[in-house]
Image (tube, grey):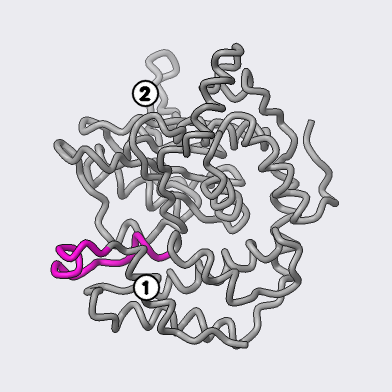
């Protein structure tokens, strides 16, 4: 049963979180960022070692929102047609018919995207940007909402095709799924021992408590959140600071500024705020910018990371009062 379209943005997030924590334990920040990205019409790049719940997170989102779910396991022999679809010749009718690929779904898990060659990656990223694909000269829109969670493994690089920085820029957030703390891992073991299979959202108790209409209603509320001129200037100053920081050779793009602005409005709406504050912007700075930066070699050698550099950059930019 789906929810009511009259619910507020805080209610939407509360109900979203309530369902996901039944299956996904100890990943509160990842759940929040996925909710923000979904409503902002952005996509997520998930990075984490095997077994931290990346697939379960995607399946649980689709279940909680009563949306169609699809998964593509990216491999080096994958072709673009394997994702977007192709024309199939019918020997009986002697005609070509279009067979849609797995990308025609609401929630798509692009598993280990860095194992696919550049043509396949480009086909997916183009569909993410255009919200549609061209098959045999026919432009076909993708279902709405359309939400991609692309995963990559940070510990294996042999036989992979790392996403170039320009393509990573298409993702709203880069979300890291780290190991849960000991208390959360104890909870996972306890649930499994009691017979709750956490690999299956249905068996974990996740229910379809929301729907596509609720997502659209939430977006309408987000559009009413006030974004002051000072906040816009603050976002531009943060992005500009990444371009002049001595630790960074490539800073945040203009697209990064736009997406951070839109995501900040969603985050504000989830908290029931009628306007965006500098704290909303700062809270999303790392996930919105970390995958768009290229650190200088000397910064990497000294042990700095995109997150640590962004923290230093944020400290040098004075937020508006």
Q: Which mark is residue 89?
A: 2
Helix, strand, or loop for circle 1?
A: loop
Q: Are marks 1 and 2 in contact (CB under 8 Å)?
A: no
Residue annotated with mark 1? 253
Number of numbered discs: 2
The residue at the point 65 percent across, 83 percent down is 228
Quarter of the N terminus within the rendering = top right
- 253 sits to left or right of 205: left
Q: Secondary structure at mark 2?
A: strand
Q: Residues within 10 Å of mark 1 (few under 14, many from 20)?
A: some
Residue at (57% x, 45% y) in the render: 28
Residue beneath the point at 59% across and 25% down: 201
Q: Nearer the viewer, residue 35 or 212?
A: 35
* Part of the protein shown in magenta: 289-304
Cα distance between the residues tagged 1 and 2? 44 Å
Viewport quadrant of the C terminus: bottom right
Among the 4 quarters of the image, the one containing residue 301: bottom left
Discs 1/2, front: 1
Judge left or right: residue 214 versus residue 241.
right
Q: Examine the image and state in which quarter residue 297 appears.
A: bottom left
Which residue lies at the image location 62% right of the left edge and 36% below the top edge? Answer: 20
What numbered label is drawn on residue 189?
Answer: none
Residue 98 in sight here: no
Residue 130 at x, y = what percent? 46, 55
From where the camera sits, is residue 164 visible? Answer: yes
Residue 92 image-quadrant placement: top left
What x and y, as percent, mark residue 272?
76, 63
Q: Position of residue 189 (x, y in %)?
A: 51, 21
Above or below, comparing residue 75 to residue 10 in the picture: above
Q: Position of residue 300 (x, y in %)?
A: 19, 63
Q: Who is closer to the viewer here, 106 or 90? A: 106
Q: State yes or no: residue 237 in magenta.
A: no
């Amino acid at each position: 049963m789906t929810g009511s379209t009259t619910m507020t943005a805080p209610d939407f997030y509360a109900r979203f979180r309530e369902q996901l924590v039944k299956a996904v334990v100890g990943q509160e920040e990842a759940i929040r960022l996925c909710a923000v990205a979904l409503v902002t019409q952005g996509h997520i790049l998930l990075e984490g070692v095997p077994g931290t719940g990346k697939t379960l997170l995607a399946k649980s989102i689709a279940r909680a929102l009563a949306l169609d779910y699809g998964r593509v396991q990216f491999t080096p022999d994958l072709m673009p047609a394997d994702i977007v679809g192709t024309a199939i010749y019918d020997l009986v009718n002697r005609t070509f018919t279009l067979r849609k690929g797995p990308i025609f779904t609401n929630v798509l898990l692009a598993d280990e995207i860095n194992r696919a060659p550049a043509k396949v990656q480009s086909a997916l990223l183009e569909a993410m940007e255009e919200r549609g694909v061209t098959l045999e000269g026919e432009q076909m829109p993708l279902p709405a909402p359309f939400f991609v969670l692309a995963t990559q493994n940070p510990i294996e690089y042999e036989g992979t095709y790392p996403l170039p920085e320009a393509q990573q820029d298409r993702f709203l957030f880069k979300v890291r799924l780290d190991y849960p703390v000991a208390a959360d891992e104890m909870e996972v073991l306890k649930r499994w021992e009691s017979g709750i299979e956490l690999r299956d959202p249905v068996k974990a108790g996740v229910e379809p408590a929301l729907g596509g209409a609720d997502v659209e209603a939430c977006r309408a509320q987000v559009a009413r959140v006030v974004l002051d001129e000072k906040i816009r200037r603050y976002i531009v100053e943060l992005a500009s600071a990444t371009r002049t920081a001595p630790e960074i050779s490539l800073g945040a793009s203009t697209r990064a500024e736009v997406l951070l602005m839109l995501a900040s409005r969603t985050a504000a709406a989830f908290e029931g705020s009628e306007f965006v504050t500098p704290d909303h912007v700062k809270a999303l700075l790392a996930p919105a910018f970390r995958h768009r930066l290229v650190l200088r070699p000397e910064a990497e050698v000294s042990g700095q990371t995109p997150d640590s550099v962004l923290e230093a950059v944020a400290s040098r930019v004075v937020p508006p009062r």
